[in-house]
Image (cartoon, helix red, strand yellow):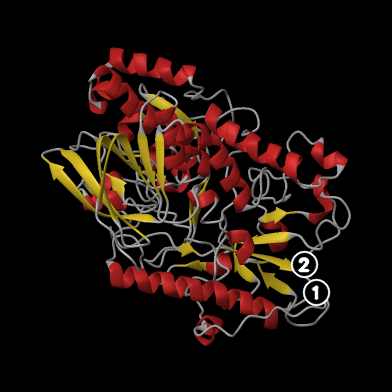
Amino acid sequence: MTTSARVVLDTDVLIVGGGLGGVAAALAVCRSGRRAVLTEETIWLGGQLTSQAVPPDEHPWVEQFGVTAAYRALRDGIRDHYRRVYPLRPEAAAWRELNPGAGRVSKLCHEPRVAVAVIDEMLAPYRSAGLLTVLTEHRPVAASTEGDRCETVTTVGRDGREVEIRASFVLDATETGELLELAGVEHVTGAESSSEHGEPHAPAEGDPLNQQGITFCFAVSHHEGEVHTIERPEMYDFWRSYRPDFWPGPLLAFLAPDPRSLEAHPRTFVPNPDTDPLAVSADQSADAGDKELWGFRRILARKLFTDGAFDSDICLVNWPLNDYWLQPYVGAGPELAERALHEARQLSLSLLYWLQTEAPREDGGQGFPGLRLRGDVTGSDDGLALAPYVRESRRIKAVTTVTEHDVSAEVLGETGRVHRRDSVGVGSYRLDLHPSTGGDNYVDVPSVPFEIPLGALIPVRVTNLLPAGKNLGTTHVSNGCFRLHPVEWNVGEVAGALVVEALATGVLPREVQADPDRFAAFARRLDAEGVERRWPAVQAY
């Protein structure tokens, strides 16, 4: 490792974390003509959509409404990329709502690097204009504060170089909200007790280390007659015999709880089925789609392309079988966090090895040795995603905390809604909590379409540091419907627009939220930029 002298940068806005929220924030800042520095720990921008390899989890109406114009441009760009670059069948190319993977989890299942390419295209004009500086493979290690302000953030690059960045406003778009801790911003982690907010699905005892599990996703293709079996993972014996107390059998098996009913339900796994991908329905409001594993998160469906272009589909493995929840990851300290990462990697590799060697086949045989781990698809050396899928971040103590009461259809009724004076966006997704490090099983209940209150982006004390991702003011429970791709983008875009408003007017973000007239002016800016802030009449799911 080589090191060089510390570099010092000055900018209008520093965005730490290059996930979807960070990218959206950078676009919002730079399209106003302001300067921004965007840092990212991995080699790819895009977070859960790219480095974590998770196809977009979205609501059923995403093709018509309910996302920002910039997020829609990202989705359109992904489809356009496939039409321009890939050898699609004419029927697939003409499909307005092209779903390249024909996966059932999303209406836009696609390969991570395609999203990387589109994000790079969206940011390219601002980088060329000198408005945007992007520092990949840089992680934050320190922050200096003065009073209620964050003055500087120091990052370290892969080469050991330190970069100190001074900015008028700082946005935390990291996957774990780590800047909140570095800058001393009041925040929470893990699960609040049921007595704290009266949430029906909160655990009886609060625990900051009771967090949703993380997952190392991976991609595979299948090549019958070939052998691509990986080396036996070092923890395979452990994971092969692991039987969670709340599971119907071994974790590595095709029997798992239905997240919505918790009843044991068999899964099927048949690589490269002959079904027509144009006939696949991706509507989680009607069918969660997770019972047939190959097509659940398929990111490339070979039959959408010209004959011979691909000899296999590509399947993204993010299943109940490789969710990891033995150790907490966020706020647990470096030793436990490293242990969690190692064991989560071992779980995913063990799942793959089990699939290759022991998994029951419909023809009565065992194992699928033709499964090929596709690190070329996920951009990694070890074949897994570049980063773990982190469902739950540190969360700011906010002016407004969104609770289960604000989003649950069980609480509000299917037609109930909480209307926000300071709405800055919309979202909709089931309250979907995966098994947790505290031993909790799935919590998966209907939610109502919700509005995102600006107050959830305003810390109780700090004046110039805002959340720009999953780290806004939610609870362990309400995070279950706020953590998904379009909401993270919406939060980041609004955070970027809000600091631009503050720079232009000299008014603090908290004053924009608190003053109805100032908020109305800011809302007009959001409306003009295509941020949808209200829902039409739609049903809960």
Three-letter code, disc 2? Val
Give the mark nearest the N terminus, 1 or 2: 2
- Looking at the rendered image, the quarter that the N terminus falls into is bottom left
At x 44%, y 63%, the residue is: 213
At x 71%, y 62%, the residue is: 294
Which residue, as the protein is rendered here, is positioned at the far right? 307
Q: Which residue is mark 2?
A: 270
Give the side of residue 113 with respect to residue 387, left or right: right
Three-letter code, disc 1? Glu
Whole-percent x, y for residue 332 in the image? 29, 65
Whole-percent x, y for residue 94 in the image? 82, 35
Question: In the rendered image, is residue 541 in sight?
Answer: no
Circle 1 packing at 10 Å, graded few (<14), some (14-19), many (20+), is few
Give the side of residue 51 with respect to residue 515, left or right: right
**Is mark 1 in CB contact (under 8 Å) with mark 2?**
yes
Q: Nearer the viewer, mark 1 or mark 2?
A: 2
Quarter of the view holding residue 205: bottom left
Question: In the rendered image, is residue 246 in sight?
Answer: yes
The residue lying toward the viewer, choosing from 171 and 257, is 171
Secondary structure at numbered mark 1: loop
Give the side of residue 311 with respect to residue 259, left or right: right
Image height check: is 454 above or below 382?
above
Image height check: is 537 above or below 42?
above
Give the side of residue 131 with respect to residue 188, left or right: right
Q: Which residue is mark 1?
A: 362
The residue lying toward the viewer, choosing from 380 and 412, is 380
C-alpha distance separating marks 1 and 2: 8 Å
At x 48%, y 21%, the residue is: 529
The residue lying toward the viewer, choosing from 76 and 64, is 76
At x 80%, y 59%, the residue is: 310
Secondary structure at numbered mark 2: loop
